[in-house]
Each structure stands twice: as structure tokens, then as C-alpha cells.
Image (cartoon, rainbow, N blue to C red):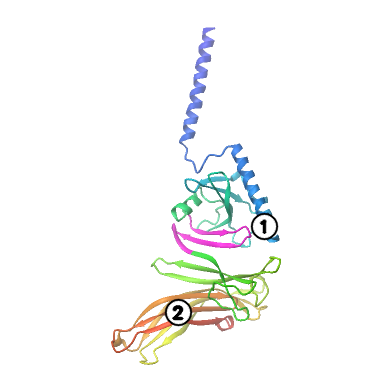
């Protein structure tokens, strides 16, 4: 009898020590965010669903479809929470492949619903966030604490594009990261466009009930220089009932001008143009060079559309070296839309000759048409 009691005592001690050891080990494991038990997961899931339903009260038909599509494809079993700051948390819910965004279409992005929860447990903000990996195309999910690092450290650990969308499935802004550093930042901006003769530079105004939208991207190069590229996105139109209609290219009226079996991707073309010539002393010539890319499409009036324009350099050709001419760039802007591309250059041609004034070159524009570049 005593032997059995002694055995029972030691057995209980072993069980208690085992439980204590397991719990101690569990506490030493790194945590990616606040621990969520089953009940908290259900509460968070209900809060997210309720917040999405509340967004429908002011949604148009397009946004309603997007909200339903997002909600149906949320992977709540993979939900995680990361710390934003001392009073707010980030709720990250992966969105499954059943959700098809029009942004970055065909690039197989990793989609997440990103929500900000305040100290009272209320969701105050939400976005669809897409990530397109650059060096690891097989990546299926973002590493833990990616969003925490984005908000608190200004960067992420993996190369690729991070794009923030609203719940209308429209791009707001995007960042490209390379080697842990910001390589580019693009933001959607409101602009104005003459639909018979498209203009490239964004202007903070609207034309009546039409609003034009551009993606204005700043590229940051390793030598410390920057370049700004402006790309026309689409035009929105609101009728008297506030119904929104979206046009992607009003001068053609055939959607995004991409896709189709009749398209041919063209090789990049370098184009040089004369920005300014010294007509007084005949001492110099300023030349700008751009690289332009495009796609031929026989069904379009212009025969195709541009897909990119990149500024390469400005070259000051000097005929009178003794005058000590030099070039100081003020700004360079390149942009494209449909069958039109533009380069805008400004700066000052300096001189060490006291008898010759410096030549100020205001913003000077060169416009390319698709048929000129790809005859």
C-alpha cells in the first residue's frame, strides 16, 4: 500500500515537472505579435467582418462587389496581429487567390487585408495591400513583422513592390524595395487632361465632372540622383447621382490598351533631341536622350501605345571650350500616355566668361508620337 502511494506521488511529480518544463519552453519561443487564442480569434474575425459590412453603407455598386469578393476570400485561419505602436495594432488577414484585383493584374501578387485597430479594440482604417516579390517569385506569404517594419523602420527585408489599394480596388501608392532600401515611390495624383490632345503634367484641378488620375513615381538611384515619371492611369466621371464611371483612355475608348493576340512588343528605342542651342555665341548645344518602349497594336488609330519612357542623360556639346561652359540641371520629367510620350528638361548653362551671361533654359518639352518612334 505504501509502495503504491509512493509511486503515485512520484508519478504526479513527474507530470507536474513536465508541464512546467513545457510551459517554460513555450514562453521562451519568439512571438511575432500578441498571442491570439481561439476566442480572441473568433472575436477579431467577427470585428473584421462587421467592419467590412459597415463599409457597404456608403459604397457604390463597384465597391460592393470588391468588398464581397474580399470578404469571401479572407483566410482567417492565417490571421495575425503585429504591433504598430504603443496604442495600436495591425490586423493582417491574407486574401486567397480567389480575389482578383485589377491592380497588378497578371503579376500574381500576395494580397492581404491590412487593418489598424486602436486601443479600444475598434478598427479605424483598412486597405488592401499587394506584394509582388522580385527575387523570390515562389513566395506565397509575407514574413512575420513585415508591416511592423514598414511602419516603424521605413523598410522591409525582402525585395519587391508593396502596393496599397483602397476598398474600391484602386491604387493609392506603391513602393519598390531593393537590398532593404527604397528604390521608388509612386503615388496616385489628381490631374487634368485634354482628351483631344493629352497633356502629361499633373495639375491639381478637375474638368467639370471628369477627374483624371496619374501615377507620379520618384525613382531613387544609387548615385543619389532621382527621376520623376508621370503615367496616366484613368479618368473618373460622376453623374448627378454620384455614380462613378471609369475610363482608361478616352481618346481610344477601348479599355487599358493592353492585351490581345494582335500585339507585338517592340525593342527599346533611344531618341535624342535638341533642348537648346546658343544662338548668340554659337558656343554650345544641349541634347537630351531618352529610352522609349512600346507595343504595336494594329487595331489602334496610332498603331500602338507606349509602355515606358526613361530619361538617360543630358549632354552639353561645347564648340568654344575657352568660354568655360557648364550645365546645371534644374529638373527632368518624363511621361507617357497611350500613343504620346514627353520629356521636359530645364536648367542653366553657366560660363566662366564674364562677358557672356548664363543661359536659363525654362521647362522645354519634346513630344513623341508612337508612329514617329515605331514607323
Camera-nearest label, 2 or 1: 1
Which residues, given as a range, are shown in magenta?
158-184
Position of 248 compared to 274: left or right? Answer: right
Image location (x, y in percent) of residue 19: 51, 26
Image position of 312 (left or right of 191): left
Counting from the top left corner in percent of width and height, residue 13 is at 49, 19
Q: Quadrant of the C terminus?
A: bottom right
Determine whether, in the image, residue 107 is placed left or right of residue 229: right
The N terminus, quarter of image? top right
Instruction: Give SS at disc 1.
Output: helix
Residue 346, compared with residue 65, is above or below; it is below
Label 2 sits on residue: 345
Instruction: Name which quarter of the figure residue 327 lies in.
Output: bottom left
Report the predominant secondary structure element of the magenta stretch: strand
Which residue is denoted by mark 1 in the rendering? 58
Residue at 47 percent across and 45 percent down: it is 86
Helix, strand, or loop for circle 2? strand
Amino acid at each position: 500500500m505504501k509502495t503504491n502511494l509512493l509511486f503515485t506521488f512520484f508519478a504526479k511529480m513527474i507530470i507536474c515537472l513536465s508541464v512546467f518544463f513545457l510551459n517554460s519552453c513555450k514562453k521562451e519561443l519568439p512571438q511575432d505579435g500578441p498571442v491570439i487564442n481561439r476566442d480572441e480569434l473568433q472575436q477579431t474575425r467577427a470585428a473584421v467582418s462587421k467592419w467590412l459590412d459597415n463599409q457597404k453603407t456608403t459604397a457604390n455598386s463597384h465597391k460592393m462587389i470588391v468588398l464581397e469578393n474580399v470578404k469571401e476570400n479572407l483566410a482567417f485561419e492565417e490571421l495575425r496581429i503585429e504591433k504598430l505602436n504603443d496604442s495600436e495594432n495591425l490586423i493582417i488577414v491574407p486574401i486567397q487567390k480567389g480575389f482578383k484585383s485589377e491592380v497588378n493584374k497578371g503579376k500574381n501578387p500576395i494580397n492581404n487585408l491590412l487593418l489598424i485597430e486602436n486601443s479600444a479594440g475598434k478598427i479605424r482604417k483598412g486597405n488592401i495591400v499587394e506584394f509582388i516579390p522580385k527575387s523570390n517569385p515562389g513566395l506565397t506569404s509575407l514574413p512575420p513583422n513585415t508591416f511592423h517594419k514598414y511602419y516603424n523602420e521605413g523598410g522591409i527585408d525582402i525585395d519587391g513592390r508593396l502596393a496599397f489599394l483602397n476598398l474600391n480596388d484602386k491604387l493609392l501608392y506603391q513602393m519598390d524595395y531593393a537590398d532593404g532600401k527604397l528604390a521608388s515611390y509612386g503615388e496616385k495624383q489628381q490631374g487634368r487632361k485634354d482628351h483631344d490632345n493629352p497633356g502629361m503634367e499633373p495639375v491639381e484641378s478637375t474638368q467639370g465632372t471628369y477627374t483624371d488620375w496619374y501615377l507620379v513615381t520618384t525613382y531613387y538611384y544609387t548615385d543619389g540622383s532621382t527621376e520623376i515619371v508621370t503615367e496616366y492611369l484613368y479618368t473618373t466621371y460622376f453623374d448627378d447621382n454620384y455614380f462613378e464611371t471609369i475610363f482608361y483612355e478616352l481618346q481610344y475608348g477601348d479599355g487599358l490598351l493592353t492585351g490581345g493576340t494582335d500585339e507585338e512588343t517592340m525593342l527599346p528605342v533611344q531618341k535624342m533631341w535638341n533642348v537648346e542651342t546658343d544662338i548668340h555665341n554659337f558656343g554650345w548645344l544641349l541634347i537630351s536622350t531618352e529610352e522609349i518602349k512600346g507595343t504595336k497594336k494594329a487595331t489602334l488609330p496610332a498603331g500602338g501605345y507606349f509602355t515606358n519612357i526613361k530619361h538617360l542623360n543630358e549632354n552639353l556639346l561645347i564648340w568654344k571650350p575657352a568660354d568655360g561652359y557648364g550645365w546645371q540641371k534644374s529638373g527632368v520629367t518624363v511621361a507617357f500616355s497611350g500613343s504620346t510620350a514627353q520629356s521636359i528638361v530645364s536648367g542653366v548653362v553657366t560660363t566662366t566668361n564674364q562677358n557672356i551671361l548664363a543661359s536659363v533654359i525654362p521647362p522645354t518639352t519634346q513630344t513623341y508620337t508612337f508612329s514617329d518612334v515605331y514607323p
